[in-house]
Amino acid sequence: MGRTCFILIWLMLIPHLSVYCQEEDNGWMAFNQQHLATESINNFSKMDYGAGTQNWGVSAGRDGMMYFANNNGLLEFDGTSWRLYHLPNETILRAVLAVNDSLIYTSGYREMGFWKRKPSGELVYHSLNSLAEQYFSRNEEFWNIVRDDDKVYFHSFNRILLYQHDSIFPTNLPGFTNVMNKVRNQILLGVRDKGIYRLLGEKITPVVTDPFFEGKIIRFILPYKKDELMIGTASNGIVIWDGKQLQQWKPDWRPYFHENELNRGYFLPNGNLVIGTIIDGIVVFDKSGNLIHKYNHTNGLQNNTILGIAGDQFNNIWLALDHGIDFISTRNNDGVRIENIPNIGAVYSAAIFQNHIYLGTNQGLFSKDLSDPSANYTLVPNTQSQNWDLRVIGNQLVVGHNEGTIVVDNGKANFISRSSGGFAIKEDSKHKGHYIQSTYYNLISYKEVDGHLVMENIISGFADLIRYIEIDHLGNIWASHMHRGIYQLRLNDKRDKVISQKYYGASSVFGKEHSLNVFKVEDRIVFTTKDKLFTYDDLNDTIIPYTHLNEHLGDYIKAHRIIKAPDHHYWFISSEKIGLFYINQSRVRLIKSYPTSYFKRSPLFEDFENILPITADKGILCLENGIAWLDASENDSLQTISNFAPQLRRLQLINRRNEAISQVPGNHALEVNYSHNSIEVRYSFPHYSAEPVFYQAFLKGIDQKWSDKSESSVFRFDRLPAGTYQLQVKATDLWHNESRVNSLTLEVQEPWYSTTLAKIGYFVLLVVFSILFQAWGARRTKRKQRIHIEKRERELILLRNKNLRTEVEHKSKELANSTMSIIKKNEFLLDLKQQVTRHKEQLGTRYPDKYFNDIIKKIDKNISSHDDWQIFETNFEQAHEQFLRKIKDDFPDLTAKDLRMCAYLRMNLSSKEIAPLLGITVRGVENHRYRLRKKMGLSHDDNLIDLILQY
């Protein structure tokens, strides 16, 4: 109702002009009719899937797995990763049929067989060549596979081999047969020049034979409506057999089909028909036969030659191409339609004018007729270079151009100003019908005359590089510099001169100069800073934080661009997301939010983001090499992600040497040996759409929160402690929709040293250790006691030995003293004897012999005194215990005199010292020593003293 009133008002005001809002609505409807969702195409090259370039067939598994017959073997895709399975003979595959995800049939050059999945998840090939090879021709190739209950048919151009009950049954064909399709419950064959035949068991019967088929190659046979057949030919279009006659389907398309050569046909689960060609990609028709999509190399496909088509459970289209694999999502978010426009550059601004859409880019101004679905964007002449700003004013399109300002009318562009760089143009609130424009250097004034914009003058008194301008209700111009700060400009009454200006930068309330822009929200001046919003307080002529919006906009207070839409709606653009808000007085409501990462393939142009509002909830978002049509009224159509859960595809247990053991994924709790307590898992999520899917993991028992979003579905957890954990994994999309959670219970076993048996062992060891410790303690105590006793004994012995040494030393001194006394005494007596003898000789008879002999006798008696020897022997035995006894025992022939000689030698006395003791001469001592050596049996080299000292 509001939109209709809005249009009626404009119709009454400008009856001769196209209504701006109505034109834009028409543009939106025209776009919806074209459905140019080229962003929904995902290209997979051979570098992505790691196999050959050509892919000949495609088949969808029941759980979403996709399989492709590739030049190098069987390709499997689980939504996150690719895997290639080579055939044993490494031959080429031509056809694939996924019966289910555990049984896949394939065929190719002189090869046919099937694959079965092991519990570990890997596919294992079982060749049927041992049964079928006898029926192969020299270069036999099998191009189609059809399964009917327990029968599997492998089709080559000249024969069909039926596999049933582990046996092969051949059937020759009535002619060159290009196609075999299962239609309803029948196996139908397309035979060149003849028509359609039915295969039942090993029997072939005609179904449709008509002269039409002469010279025709049949490419597909599909069920159509009730009991009708749709038959596609290579170069003669598509015909319908109603059971009685053939009639052309969509005759107006026959030239296109003839020119581009049909190759494949496929009905999606939703009833849409996909036609694949050899030369021009695919075309998609709805159930009524209306064209809804057309895809080829110019708008997204890698290659125009379609070799295989399949649809998945979500009605997405998978294409096996002559060069790669393409995925086309039909499950796009209905609120976003991206139109990829190659080679036009970065789009700065957009406008819908005179039933054309105009795009201002860094390469020029481009336009397209919205009424012609086949129209392409063309460059408007004389508009090359940057086109910054597009705005419909009156009945003209005003373009802010790098070299000035252009007006466009009826597709022709003319300059009305040569002041370079028209950035923004706003109507002057103090001078209706007049406009002020910011440029690279100046502010320019324009006026509208009869629906045409005319330049008035350059506003003097100010010159700077201004990106955005807004004019408040007081007539102040607020100008945000391209790179730094905000200006408040006041004009004179004529509005042709700046009479005062104020600069707001780092020293102002903003606290900085960069990232400052100015816009309007509900007629209030609003400043963006990428941190929070500010507004102009006209009562106090100051800038203050915009508290109300800052409290209600959430993260959008960091927006750097605000664009007004009809009916109190505003687009806020930040670096991370785009939001549409309804703002009216105190009410602030978020209508819809779009993450900027959604547009990563055709990203927004940084710092030049822009949206053309079409209605209150629709707009055109400017991108690099394209635009996005946003419809905030549409609900998110991709919430079906919540009906699915990621599937565990690989689980590896890893030890500390990084050696891995693969485990079979299952729903039961997994017991993990502690020696391999690092875990790596990989998940698949075959929930196909054009949008990226992110994965998060939460290991209950370890993690405190879900992991950050990651595009990788591989998670690793290192060195988990013993215990029970629950690993939870979920998928999320850009719109924060979440899948169901896949849960896996992990039981990390105790290390061997923490098991019950180990604990029993520890207890036994503890008991044994305690016993041994006690025994050791007792032994240690005894040892200490023994050591103490021994120490005491050693001390006593040392003391006794010390006493003995002291006593021996004392005895030795006594012995030495007594010996020296004896020596001195004997020496004295010998001297006395000699002197008496001399006196006798001198006196002769005068010295009577009686007296002489008596004195000599007494002297000799004292020299050889037995008492002296007894004293010496006693002292000697005390100093040298048992010496005389031991030497006597060893040498029993020794006389008493010999023993005395030995005693003197033991004391280390010289011959001179010994002579007085024995009362003989030194010569007599030497002779005595000689006789002693003989008695002891010593040789010439033996030392007598050394022998005696041993005792």
Image (spheres, rainbow, N blue to C red):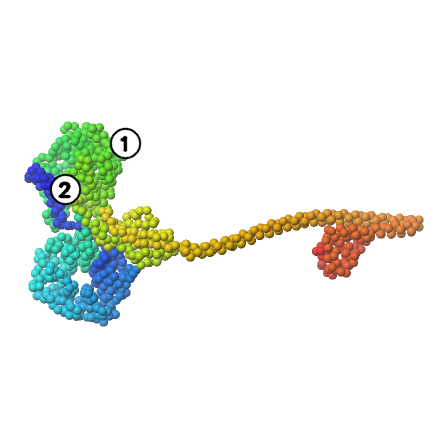
- Give x and y (percent) for residue 60: 21, 58
Mark earlier in primary sequence (2, 1): 1
Residue 220 vertical placement versus 823 (above, below): below
Q: Which mark is residue 615?
A: 2
- Within 10 Å of disc 1 (Cα), the crowding (few <14, some 14-19, many 20+) is few
Three-letter code, disc 1 = Ser
Direction bottom: furthest residue: 134
Using residue 759 as the reference point, say whether residue 335 is left or right of it: left
Residue 766 vertical placement versus 521 (above, below): below
User: At x 22% / y 52%, what residue is drawn?
Assistant: 643
- Give x and y (percent) for residue 67: 23, 59
Direction right: furthest residue: 846
Camera-side residue: 2 or 910? Answer: 2
Q: Which mark is residue 507?
A: 1
- Give x and y (percent) for residue 723: 36, 52
Instruction: Say which of marks 2 and 1 sits in front.
Output: 2
**The quarter of the displayed image where residue 607 is located:** top left
Give the structural element (helix, strand or loop) at label 1. loop
- Give x and y (percent) for residue 32: 13, 48
- Within 10 Å of disc 2 (Cα), the crowding (few <14, some 14-19, many 20+) is some
Camera-side residue: 222 or 135? Answer: 222
Camera-side residue: 874 or 408? Answer: 874
Residue 73 vertical placement versus 2 (above, below): below
Give the structural element (helix, strand or loop) at label 2. loop
Three-letter code, disc 2 = Thr
Pick the quarter of the image with the C terminus. bottom right
